[in-house]
Amino acid sequence: MKLSRRRFMQTVAAGAAVSGWQLPIFGQSSQLNTLKIPELYYGDMRSGVNHYALTAQSGTVDFLPGLRTPTIGINGDYLGPTLRLMNGDDVAIAVRNQLGEETTLHWHGLHVPAKVDGGPAQIIAAGAEWNPQFRVSQKAGSFWYHSHMLHQTGAQVYRGLSGMIIIDDEDSSKLELPAEYGVDDIPLIVQDRRFNADGSFRYIGMHMDVMTGMYGDTILVNGTGAALFTPTTQRVRFRLLTAANARSFNFAFDDNREFQLIASDSGLLSAPVTLHHLELAPAERAEIVVNFSDGAPVKLVSLPLDANSPFTPQGMMRNMLPMNSTPIQILAIAPQSQLESRVEIPDQLAEIQRISASEAQHVRRFTLSMPMGMGMMNMRASGGRGQMGNMGNEFQINGKTMDMATINERVNMGDTEIWEITNDSMMMHPFHIHQGQFQILDRNGVPPPAAEMGFKDTLRVGPGETARIIMRFEHFADPETAYMYHCHILEHEDNGMMGQFTVS
Ligand code: C2O
Ligand code: CU
Ligand code: CU
């Protein structure tokens, strides 16, 4: 199979010249870099408690040839280790902050008490240590952790403060799925970044970077630019995590091969779903299984959003957004010549009880809006290069911007609720709720596709759409400490599109 390797190298060399690749190959060169795999971290079991030690620290990375980028990371220069947790385990995490600035660390998608959730109230001062403890109580899935510092989440995540969490449970460990981490079970933390000429990250250069959220022109996967992965097995499970600040991806392969979706945000689906492409917004995750037994080189790409997709920007946002109008290369894949054949994919993955709308005790309504005040007018007058400022009320939920002193909603412990989320703006917002998992009932009255029939913690709401989710609020009663709900475009979150709720 030397041939296919050579064909691959030709494909790669030609890749830079393929027109329509707006973000083609990293740094305009055809040089590929081996995909980095974040270290797997199982923790230290001591007297029945699994201990983890995480240090937020600063560092540097040579993302671009010959240039040094100042970064931050967890136990390293950029991103952090993959935390592996088991359902039912008691976990103690020591989070040390050596950043020289305040931060927080949030466990996105974990069903934990608000006090240890790592939201904007759980500030870790510079030099301090934070010691959350909790019991893992949820099904297997791919989750993540990231800074949730008020007004600074976007900047801190951009500089590197995030990582993956994998939860296993008894049922998932018995499933015949690719499960050897770093071999046939591969995390893909996908981000886009922009750089200054000196190699430093460029974060928010103009007002539009706030309006649309921060878009980059260079793709990093697990912190690797122009990444190359070499499968050694026929089937590979990819755990996709969109850890970009604002960009959505429409994942596909450049030869249009099919793949099986086995898990969405918050765990395994009831059965695999065969797809040719998969759209994921910031903070959404998916696990897919891809068959490489033909040995052919292929690229994981992001296709343009479908013009009539309900998530496509509308009206003037359509012209303003530099988003997703051309294909983007995410990952080059070159299978090695001998592929080990391993598992088949089971037909049944997990038991998912759909929650019926009739179980809800309460309906709450949320309207997401971008009132487009002075800031927007500045931006239009200056062709997108307007000054920052006047951005205080550009992003709202129910007409309000985030205020740490306001509890927006109070949920009764034990209730099942329907949250009806209306998007009254011209672009999609990925809406995320802390505390646990929900199911999507419908969008504009239409039930979601099979790919979204499992449990989730983040959902896309398209412009003009009303989506309904149903969620159980159980286990944790604490009238003092709030959970967050917010848009996961981090610049929207940082500028007000967030609210707080308690469960008691
Ligand atoms: Cu991914 Cu409120 O967080
Ligand atoms: Cu979260
Ligand atoms: Cu938003």
Image (cartoon, grey):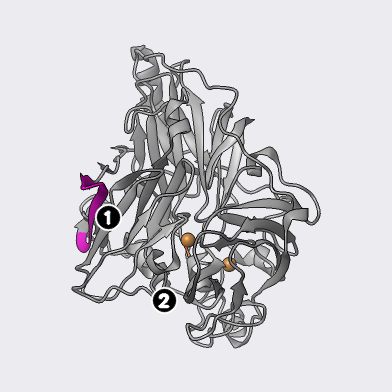
Q: Does the magenta stretch include residue 422?
A: no
Q: Which residue is drawn at 33% across and 33% down?
A: 181
- How far across and down, in percent of the image, does residue 337 sit? 35, 14
- How far across and down, in percent of the image, does residue 379 sit? 57, 80
Query: Which one is earlier in the sequence, the residue at label 1 or at label 2?
Result: 1
Provide the major secondary structure of the magenta segment. Answer: strand
Q: Picture quarter containing residue 25?
A: top left
Q: Which amino acid does label 2 sit on?
A: Leu
Farthest residue, direction right: 445
Query: Which is more toward the observer, 300 or 88?
Result: 88
Please determine whether, in this image, residue 84 is positioned above or below residue 313: above
Name the side, left or right, on which 471 lies relative to 97. Answer: right
Mark identifier at residue 425: none
Name the side, left or right, on which 169 lies relative to 443. Answer: left
Quadrant where the image shows the N terminus:
top left
Q: Is residue 51 magenta?
A: yes
Quadrant where the image shows the C terminus:
bottom right
Q: Can residue 79 be seen in this view?
A: no
Nearer the observer: mark 1 or 2; the answer is 2
Q: Residue at x 46, y 16 (%)?
A: 293
Q: Mark 1 points at which residue?
A: 78
Crowding at dot 2, Cα within 10 Å, few <14 / some 14-19 / many 20+, comes out as: many
Is disc 2 placed on a helix, strand or loop? loop
Q: Mark 2 points at which residue?
A: 150
Is disc 1 placed on a helix, strand or loop? loop
Q: Which residue is drawn at 72% across and 63% down?
A: 361
Magenta range is 44-59
Q: What residue type is labelled 1?
A: Tyr
Q: Residue at x 60, y 51 (%)?
A: 325
